[in-house]
């Protein structure tokens, strides 16, 4: 059996390695256009930022072996042809025409695997000419080397176009090189396709504190150069100095070869595959960043280029080629990253994508507060009107990954908030609180569905504060907390939780309650509702609200009164 794989990235080499483990007699050839096979592209920002010392670190196994051409030949008996381009597929003859240097050749196949990956998107910006020194992407080791070349020429100012995953990680990497970094995002908050606004604002506040100049709702209109090198950019009509411009406007599937061969593309523009990762040609499989996936919740076709997904694709492809019936069920768009020590992650749907969404916003610590290593985390759990979990977002310097993975498992299995409430999670003070925050978020959703919690989101509360509307907010924190940091607004008054019962006559018929994380304000609201008042709680308290207050320029800080 002859197998040809086009693309030496995660999906292609995973498929090749799995086929070899299942069939030692198969002839496997991998065609890779670049210099390096099996590059961990997710590690490129860490290489630029100095956490990795050399390019080979991006090719190493856990035990230090470098996954180069010799490694794949000696260890796996797989022929990897680097700096080789596949230029044409003859589906009738089952052959692939390749070009290596100035030499053409042809490879026959019984099965062909397309793992052609993705390529960077270039937004329509005047002067965005990659022939000019200082304009780069961060999609390959060669791109990283270009960044180092510019930096070594004493470049001090960098502009990043796009505040997605790569853009944000690149911001920290360039900051680690002591560069002045500006990130420009055309949408109104960072990570617009991944996060809802209140969680995105937490990220924005954090990176601004670290010295990043973050410009949302802004557009790079022009890239300036002196004929050879970048000198700056024009953003919203204003010139910003820059010797380096990193284009991080996303990626798109690399499908030209497949399209030329008549392989069917999907509605996202990526290669259409069935659940066995088979294309419209039964002898051609495809996986990784060049294919579209099915969203587990919506059932719709989505494009989610991730290394983790690509590896799963590779295994499914190999199984089916070798006679094992294997399927890929789809994706939830799960993503996680770290920036300046803050962990940020998401899975499933955003609130804005869910009709009649019910959310649980909670804040607290990742383990018991009396342990010195405890760290803050914030969780936004999203359910539909039936209570079925459909999304989760989390941020904080504490451990969010296991909470996110609990949500992934719950969504995948169709669990409801009531199911999560009773998950028998691992508990001890060094690992979590007795009621873990993910359970607390599920309980808040249950409270809302049961009609015993009425809340207002941080985003909606900000809109109220910006209006001239008359209302009363009861801040139920202690007097000391209130005076040290609170909203500077006459509509906000302080009645500590410990005084609510004795001062109930001072409280109007309709109020909004707020505290630091939402627990005390919920308790106050329950008392008030049971005593004839209407009370709404600010979801997640100041933990969710404060970054939005800062972003929208609302007065927040020490009170003189």
Image (spheres, helix red, strand yellow):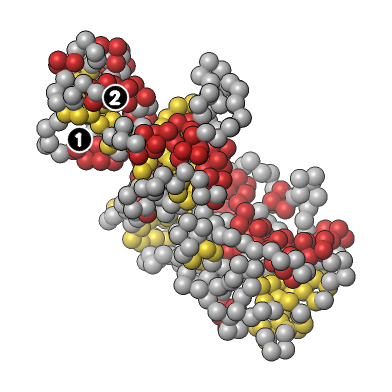
Q: Position of residue 167 (x, y in %)?
A: 48, 51
Q: Residue at x 84, y 67 (%)?
A: 23
Report the front residue among 45 and 275. 275
Q: How many marks?
A: 2
Percent x, y for residue 68?
Answer: 78, 59
Task: From the viewer's perspective, tell me whether residue 14 is left or right of residue 481.
Answer: right
Quadrant holding the N terminus: bottom right
Please give the residue where the numbered disc 2 appears in the rendered image: 526
Determine crowd level at label 2: few under 14, some 14-19, many 20+ residues with C-alpha closer than 10 A: some
Residue pictured at 84% horizontal, 71% vertical = 26
Secondary element under disc 1, as helix, strand or loop, is helix
Q: Quadrant of residue 9?
A: bottom right
- State whether residue 295 is above or below residue 441: below
**Which residue appears at 58% of the width and 84% of the height?**
262
Residue 119 visible somewhere in the drawing:
no
**Residue with the mark numbered 1:** 465
Secondary structure at numbered mark 2: helix
């Amino acid at each position: 059996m002859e197998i040809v794989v086009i693309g030496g990235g995660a999906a292609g080499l995973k498929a090749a390695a799995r086929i070899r483990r299942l069939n030692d007699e198969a002839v496997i050839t991998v065609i890779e256009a670049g210099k390096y096979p099996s590059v961990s592209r997710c590690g490129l920002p860490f290489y630029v930022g100095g956490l990795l010392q050399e390019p080979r670190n991006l090719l190493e196994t856990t035990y230090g072996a470098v996954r180069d051409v010799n490694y794949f030949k000696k260890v796996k008996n797989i022929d990897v042809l680097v700096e080789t381009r596949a230029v044409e597929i003859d589906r009738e003859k089952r052959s692939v025409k390749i070009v290596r240097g100035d030499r053409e050749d042809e490879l026959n196949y019984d099965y062909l695997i397309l793992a052609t990956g993705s390529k960077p998107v270039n937004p329509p910006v005047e002067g965005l000419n990659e022939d000019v020194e200082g304009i780069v992407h961060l999609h390959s080791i060669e791109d990283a080397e270009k960044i180092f070349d510019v930096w070594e020429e004493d470049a001090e100012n960098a502009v990043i176009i796009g505040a997605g995953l790569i853009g944000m990680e690149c911001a920290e990497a360039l900051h680690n090189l002591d560069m002045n970094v500006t990130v420009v995002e055309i949408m109104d908050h960072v990570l617009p396709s991944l996060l809802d606004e209140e969680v995105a604002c937490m990220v924005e506040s954090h990176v601004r504190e670290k010295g990043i100049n973050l410009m949302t709702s802004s557009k790079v209109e022009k890239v300036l150069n002196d004929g050879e090198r970048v000198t700056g950019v024009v953003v919203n009509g204003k010139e910003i100095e820059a010797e380096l411009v990193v284009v991080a406007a996303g990626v798109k599937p690399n499908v030209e070869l497949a399209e030329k061969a008549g392989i069917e593309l999907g509605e996202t523009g990526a290669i259409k595959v069935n659940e066995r990762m088979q294309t419209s040609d039964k002898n051609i499989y495809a996986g990784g960043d060049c294919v579209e996936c099915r969203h587990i919740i919506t059932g719709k076709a989505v494009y989610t280029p991730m290394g983790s997904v690509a590896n799963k694709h590779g295994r499914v492809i190999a199984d089916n080629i070798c006679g094992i019936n294997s399927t890929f069920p789809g994706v939830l768009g799960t993503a996680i990253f770290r920036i300046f020590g803050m962990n940020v992650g998401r899975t499933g749907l955003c609130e804005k994508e869910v009709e009649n969404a019910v959310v649980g916003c909670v804040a607290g610590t990742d383990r018991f507060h009396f342990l010195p290593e405890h760290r803050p985390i914030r969780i936004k759990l999203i359910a539909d009107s039936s209570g079925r979990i459909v999304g989760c977002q989390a941020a904080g310097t504490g451990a969010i990954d296991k909470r996110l993975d609990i949500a992934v498992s719950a969504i995948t299995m169709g669990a409801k908030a009531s199911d999560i409430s009773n998950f028998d999670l691992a508990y001890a003070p060094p690992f979590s609180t007795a009621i873990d925050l993910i359970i607390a978020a599920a309980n808040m959703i249950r409270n809302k569905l049961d009609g015993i919690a009425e809340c207002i989101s941080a985003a909606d509360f900000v809109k109220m504060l910006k209006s001239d509307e008359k209302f009363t907010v009861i801040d139920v924190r202690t007097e000391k907390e209130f005076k040290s940091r609170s909203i500077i607004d006459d509509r906000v008054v302080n009645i500590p939780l410990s005084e609510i019962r004795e001062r109930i006559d001072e409280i109007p018929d309709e109020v909004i309650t707020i505290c630091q994380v939402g627990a005390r304000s919920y308790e106050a609201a329950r008392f008030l509702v049971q005593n004839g008042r209407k009370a709404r709680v600010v979801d997640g308290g100041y933990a969710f609200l404060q970054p939005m207050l800062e972003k929208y320029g609302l007065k927040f800080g020490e009170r003189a009164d």
